[in-house]
Amino acid sequence: MVGRQRIIDMFLGKNTAAASAFATEFWALNRRGYTIKEFLDNPFKLAPVVIEEALNIDSDIFFLLAGLTSVPVMALGGELKFPEKGAPFMENPLIRDKSDLFKLDINKIKSDRNVNSLRQIADFINEKVKEKMILAVNCRAPFTQAAQMVGPDTFMRMLRKDENFADEVLRFSTEIFLEYVTLFIESGIEMIYISDPSASGDLISKRHFEKFAFPYLDKINRYIKSKGAKTFFHICGDTGDRLDLIREIGPDIMSVDHKVDIGEAKRLLEDKVILAGNIDPSSVMEYGSVADVARAAKECIKKAGHGRFILMPGCEISGETPLENIKEMLKIGHSSKLNKD
Amino acid sequence: MKDIDILKTIADNVVEMEEELTAKNSKKALEMNISPLTIINQGLVIGMNEAGRLFEENEYFVPELLLCSDAMYAGLKVVTPHIKKEETHVLGKVVIGVVEGDTHDIGKNLVKVLLQASGFEIIDLGRNVPARDFVDKAKQVDADLICLSTLMTTTMGEMKKVIELLKEERLRDRVRVLVGGGPISESFARNIGADGYGENAAGAVRVAKRVLNIPDALAS
């Protein structure tokens, strides 16, 4: 059975033995010595590299544009710096005060050259890999995107000192998200990978999550589903205390980081949301041996492999992660007896 | 008001994220002829340490800790110009930064604040810092400790590079290395040969003191 079918069967309620590498285009490019800037500048030239690397592993889901989640903000005038290594970042905040917010023109997203080329490349890569795997396009959730637009430290302070402005930025950030994501869904992308690292329990309290992240995640989740696409949520770090709220939102898949007790996550999400996780992406996947990976994979399956479950690393893997470790994880996930009907 | 009362009030102001009140009461304490170092060590730092404790216990999160540090800095701004140079005692020199490829610096900033509050001199290299820059700066300022931070799994390898460069430069015995950040773990720190792993900002301070053999009594 190919990966794509495993995930589709799971959406249909079957307990297939699914596994995904949490490998992204960033991972593929890094493996082959290319930067994310080179990909953005000439995506069609490097698309074959991404496709080849994606098809080389038997992953049920492949994640695209994880290194380029800043592009919609860039379309609005955000000045991004592309370091030699790592993902692009904003050098200066796009929004410094309320007047900046009102100056931003959301229509620029639809006509932006980078946005359009990424939409086309996502479509192109999807066509090449979709027989084998589901392609999930990464869009940054409103909360994390708002933090990026204002500046992370400023946004964190704003949550306590200027709630009204934080809400205004979040509403606008949600509009950006919807405008951007619609382009991909209308192109035929079947799954949206929504990442919200700033909404982690490592950064904000559950109270702040409920007030500032939850309503917007709920809104975008409903929207994407209403358009017929599936939602894959990932929040880095410890999310254990807010999984009840995630269950309430009800994404199709929730991926948890290695800091979360996977057994407890399974209990909290029940079978309403498909749980994915959560092998340590660095200590085990990158720096561990094949035997370490096997041990950690079996442990995850033992704790959470009943019902619908996708064995995955707890977060995106780096380009340095040994291929044999990735393949071992996928092999164990795909042969898991616990998951099978 | 007694000395002890105003110092406790200052500490409470920091914990309660009251920037203006912290500055106002620090000024008041100076007017009461309390020494600047006493105001810092028995007021501002006590408050910041308490904030760090609340952070470790998941009572406070990043927004709260940032506002506590704002309050502490507001107090320091009032008090610091009154410190006589010979009064200062530095526990150690620390070069800190986010490794190359990563720009998430909130965690690094929090560690910096708490290390400063504990009496360390900090040289902050900022974010997206090449491995070579950490080593060059440590050499230049004769640092005791390098603190490396990253939030991304994709840039963790940069930490190892810093350690290797320190070895190449024959500085490894002289400079300790502490690593931390979201995806970092104790075993990762061990694997790359770091001297310590800071699980969170407050934990990083404890580990910094441990790896530099600084007894707790000497620290604020």
Image: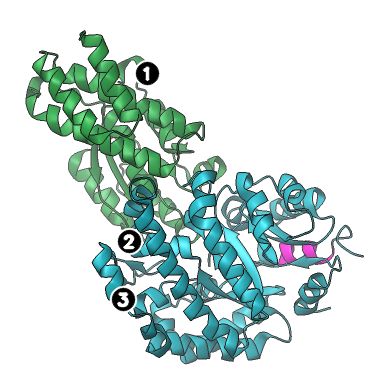
Residue at (70% x, 73% y) in the render: A59
Q: Label 2: state its secondary structure.
A: helix
Give the chain letter at badge 1: B
- At label 2, the amino acid type is Val
Closer mark to the observer between disc 1 and disc 3: 3
User: Mark 3 vs mark 2: which is more N-terminal?
Assistant: 3
- At label 1, the amino acid type is Asp
Whether the residues at callouts 2 and 1 have beta carbons within 8 Å, the answer is no
Measuring from the top left, give residue B220's x and y in whole percent: 30, 20
Q: Answer above or below: position of A149 versus A46.
A: above
Residue at (22% x, 35% y) in the render: B73
Color used for chain B?
A: green
Closer mark to the observer between disc 3 and disc 2: 3
Color used for chain A?
A: cyan
Q: Give the class, few, some or many, for how many residues have Cα within 10 Å of label 3's Cα (few <14, many ≥20).
A: some
- At label 3, the amino acid type is Leu
Which residue is label 1 attached to? Answer: B216
Bounds of the magenta segment: A327-335
Q: Nearer the viewer, residue A173 or A45?
A: A173
Measuring from the top left, give residue A197's x and y in whole percent: 50, 57
Left or right of residue A270, residue A90 in this image: left
Asked if badge 3 and badge 2 are on a common chain, one would say yes
Q: Nearer the viewer, residue A274 or B207?
A: A274
Give the chain letter at badge 3: A
Measuring from the top left, give residue A96's x and y in whole percent: 25, 62
Which residue is label 2 attached to? Answer: A150
Which mark identifies residue A104? 3
Which mark identifies residue A30? none
